[in-house]
Amino acid sequence: MADIPLVLEPIGWVESSLVDPDAAPLQGDEGAPDAWLVFDHGVSAGMRELRAGTDVLVFTWLDRARRDVLRVHPRGDVGRPETGVFSTRSPDRPNPIGLHRVEILAIDGVRVQVRNLEALDRTPVLDVKPVLGPTGER
Amino acid sequence: MADIPLVLEPIGWVESSLVDPDAAPLQGDEGAPDAWLVFDHGVSAGMRELRAGTDVLVFTWLDRARRDVLRVHPRGDVGRPETGVFSTRSPDRPNPIGLHRVEILAIDGVRVQVRNLEALDRTPVLDVKPVLGPTGER
């Protein structure tokens, strides 16, 4: 069935002060810095309704992760038993897609500043989606 | 920068009674059926701690979506103004990654039954992640 390769095209990149994987927080609400999403000009029509003050889901490609790992110690704590990656948020997993819920702080052309993003500098951005509200407001 | 192609490897497939895109609900909580995620045997070590009764995030590749679309009428309603895809949940977008929060109903070997999944039959599954609890419980 997987006869056609599923190839991702980054829509942009993370610009962040986080450059050292070992120093990065594990989740955005654990001390991650504000950062910028820099969109490719070719997709700018898709971002025109993004607004400061709203929360969005950002999807990234965790390009420094290992894809051959299926079991990990959660949060890198060897005191915790090895667990299947699909029950953890480990970046190491077959398809290292990062999911980040962040607040948009500012928008400047194709640059979008977001609060508390734990992704490293130069991480490819794959998608941005709105947070779903109640069914009546979609 | 995007010098290395970002290629996804499906970890499994959706098995669902939904085969017609035009008949599929737009979101899982809008009348989607229960469905099965059928994992590849090669990744079964990663799913060992999945448990019935818990909620998980399922990532899919919406392989019947259009990738050249940047603006859509939300929910296909031409009465609503065209909106950038990054402010909608449209499947049509540069990287058609589907995100579905579902409850696990049952597990049978490499098959995981989930409630209310709006993905079509044979949709590739990319990842499964736990829903994050409060910081103290991670």
Image (cartoon, coloured by chain):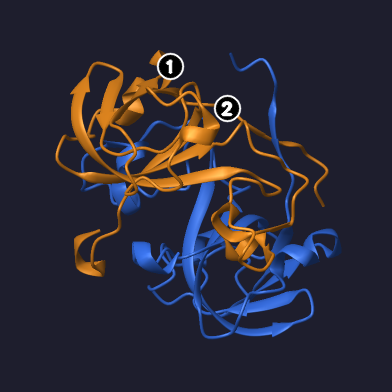
Chain colours: A orange, B blue
Q: Position of residue B21 (x, y in %)?
A: 55, 59
Q: Crowdedness of circle 1 by 10 Å Cα count: few (<14), some, many (20+)?
A: few
Asked whether B12 or B69 is in front, the reply is: B12
Q: Residue at x 51, y 44 (%)?
A: A98
- First reached walking from the N terminus: tag 1 or tag 2: 2
Looking at the image, residue B114 lies above or below residue A136: below
Which label belongs to residue A9? 2
Query: Mark 1: which amino acid?
Result: Gly
Subunit under mark 1: A
Alpha-carbon span between mark 1 and mark 2: 11 Å
Q: Residue at x 74, y 69 (%)?
A: B38
Asked whether A30 or B26 is in front, the reply is: A30
Q: Crowdedness of circle 2 by 10 Å Cα count: few (<14), some, many (20+)?
A: some
Task: Determine whether the residue tagged by mark 1 lies in a helix, strand or loop.
Answer: helix
Query: Mark 2: which amino acid?
Result: Glu
Quadrant where the C terminus of chain A lies? bottom left
Subunit under mark 2: A
Asked if residue A130 shows in the view, the reply is: yes
